[in-house]
Image: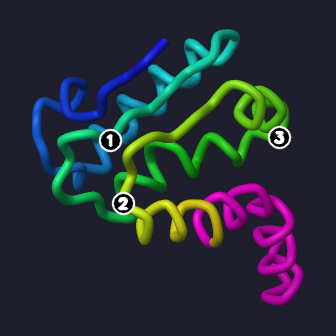
Amino acid sequence: MKLYVKDFIKSKFATSGEKGFELQNNIKNNLNDKIIIDFEGIDLVNTAFLRRSIGELYKEKNLIPKLEQNLTIQNLDEDDLEILNSRIIPLYKNYKEIEKSQKEFFNED
């Protein structure tokens, strides 16, 4: 399955967290198949869109193997891909541990 972000969000600007969340749900519902997320024709992507559409999926530990096996990103600007792979995805992969550390630090239950 190939999802063209431009067709999905009906814009060449991937900046809406809300649209990112809609794409996230589409990805999640199709993770049993190979999915290509194609950013062809997108002129601008912000981190809010990347976090909502892809990053937050990595908070769910049970999805990580399927994401790593079935999800491919194409035509995303090299700098945006670097941000996604080196900052956003690792942050959400470790989300539970970070949250736990913060609670311990602030003595919250």
Q: Amino acid at mark 2?
A: Asp
Is 105 magenta? The answer is: yes
Q: Which residues are magenta?
A: 87-109
Q: Determine which of the numbered discs, if any, sits on residue 39 in the image.
A: 1
| Image quarter in which the C terminus is found | bottom right
Residue with the most extreme left position: 11
The structure residue drawn at horizontal position 47% and vertical position 25%, both measured from the top left corner, is: 25
- Quarter of image, res 57: top right
The structure residue drawn at horizontal position 43% and vertical position 18%, both measured from the top left corner, is: 2
According to the picture, the residue beneath numbered tag 2 turns out to be: 77
Q: Label 3 neighbourhood size at 10 Å, few (<14), some (14-19), many (20+)? A: some
Q: Which is more N-terminal, label 1 or label 3?
A: 1
Residue contact at pointers 1 and 2, CB within 8 angstroms: yes
Alpha-carbon distance for marks 3 and 1? 25 Å
Q: Which is more N-terminal, label 2 or label 1?
A: 1
Q: Amino acid at mark 1?
A: Phe
According to the picture, the residue beneath numbered tag 3 turns out to be: 61
| Above or below: residue 16 compared with residue 84 | above
Residue contact at pointers 3 and 1, CB within 8 angstroms: no
The structure residue drawn at horizontal position 45% and vertical position 20%, both measured from the top left corner, is: 26
